[in-house]
Image (tube, helix red, strand yellow):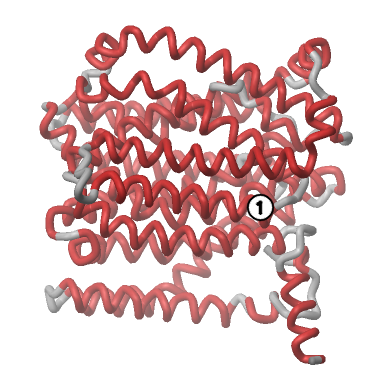
Amino acid sequence: MARRSSTLKWLDRLFSTQGLSGPVLTLLSGASIVMVIGYLALGVIARLYLPAEIGIGKYFVTIMALVGAVASLRYEDALMLPKKDEDAAVLIWLAATVMLLTAALLTVLAIWSTEIALFLDFPAIAPYLPLVPLALICMRSGKIAEFWLVRKRAFRHISAGHVSLTTSMVIGRIGAGAPPINANEAGHIGGFIFGHVIASSFFIWVALRRSAAAIRTAFGWRRMQQAAVRYQRFALFSTPSSAIGAIMGHLTVLLIPFFFTTDVAENALGFYGMALAAIGIPISYVARSVAHPFFVSAAEAQLAGNLSQISSLVHRRLIMIGLFPVLAVMLAGPDFFELWLGSSFRQAGIYAAYIAAWLVLSSTVSPLTRVYDVTERQRLDFAMALLLLVCLSVAWILGGLSGSIDVMLIAGGITGAVVRSVQLFVILRLAGVPWREGIAPYRDFFLLSLPGLALIGTALLFGNKWITTGALVLGAACYFGLVMWKEQLFRTLSPNRTPGDEA
């Protein structure tokens, strides 16, 4: 009994809502479930939908990401800053009001769906543009509620919400694509919306259950106007910066239809979408699991004067998790994708190798951009994002003009990795992290990855996808085993240590 009691106390500290490591581990526990569900589902979805159908679905998701980035003028990002809950709750109403006005505008624009689709040079998306306002309300209302739960440190509920999002999205897509329905891209898009309906309902229900009185009494037009003025930097600088970030992440999807015929573009978008999903499932959920707790802890660290320490630690942990997978995908991506998704998606593995470094660096930068918010340097955030957008746009356009999607993706992948590295350097300097300390994780974890990469490289000589995939799994186990030993992660998670000591 004493042993069991000790274990329960250790788990309670490990998944504490305080500090940084407890919330991160709580969210990562949900992210692990999401990753398993997502990876298993991709293999099924790839066999239910054609590449072109997945490509059209990816285009719809891209539109939602772009619209969602600006729909509420990012006022929910300021929820961590007020000291009193009643002041913070006003921002919920403000963000929700702006979001509903945006949805109303999009509803009017949906009248010209066909013309908009022709302007985008992607006619296949026209029937689905009227769904954008509904999807926007589902997405952003849930996201606003999620930010409130971050403020309340309800990380277990946030983790559960992420699991519900992925699970319901998978159920919707597989249910619509399987017999007897056999839906085309409509099933893929419908599953996306269904997932956000379920997840948003969950987040809103939890937020109201915890804070209904505070949220209800915070409503007031005058208070909303005052909050809009007080936090106008988020609308003026964070919103365009967020839009630029969203464009950078989805610019390829927008540009491919302009440079290639409809049939080629739809299939290419399908391969590219599966490549993004395969790499993005683990790294995006890890980044999201880190981002919310880091935002809260970084705000506290800025007040305490130790922002550099927490930023350096989070940066190191993100590189620790992401470096080996990106190198492994560059080597074994095509064989792994063919075995996992089927022979028709081998090309997606090639695309993944082109963009892997860019995506991993993007997932590393994403949580750390909260440094701009806690230091209230939104102007610098906007300036950097604009510079990065220009560089990436030039790379994608020049690559598209070559007439080869491969050249376009290689040019964008290399440029994306470079510009994200520049952004990461600026953020770490703003946080006060010495440059040597910022470079050290790349050196350390590259050396630890060499045995696993050597194993994969040897397996490639056999030209067998089963052997290559087996080597990839063994190489990953080797790398993470070395990391746990070198970084003393078991000692980090010792019951004698406080959860907030490490990330």
Q: Determine which residue is flagged by label 1.
A: 157
Front residue of 202 and 29? 202
Task: Identify residue type, mark 1.
Answer: His
Q: Is residue 456 above or below residue 210?
A: below
Left or right placement of residue 243 versus residue 85 in this view: left
Q: Residue at 46% of width from left, 55% of height from top? A: 283
Q: Residue at 19% of width from left, 39% of height from top? A: 268
Bin the neighbour count of mark 1 within 10 Å (Cα to Cα): few under 14, some 14-19, many 20 and up: many
Left or right placement of residue 57 versus residue 370 in this view: left
Examine the rendering and report whether any part of residue 387 can be seen. no
**Residue found farthest to the front:** 180
The location of residue 253, given as percent across then percent down, is: 30, 32
The location of residue 368, given as percent across then percent down, is: 61, 45
Q: Is residue 153 above or below residue 469?
A: above
- Report which quarter residue 187 is drawn in: top left
Left or right placement of residue 280 versus residue 404 in this view: right
Q: Residue at 69% of width from left, 51% of height from top? A: 293
Query: How many marks overall?
Result: 1
Quadrant including the C terminus:
bottom right
Examine the rendering and report whether any part of residue 278 can be seen. yes
The location of residue 231, given as percent across then percent down, is: 75, 21
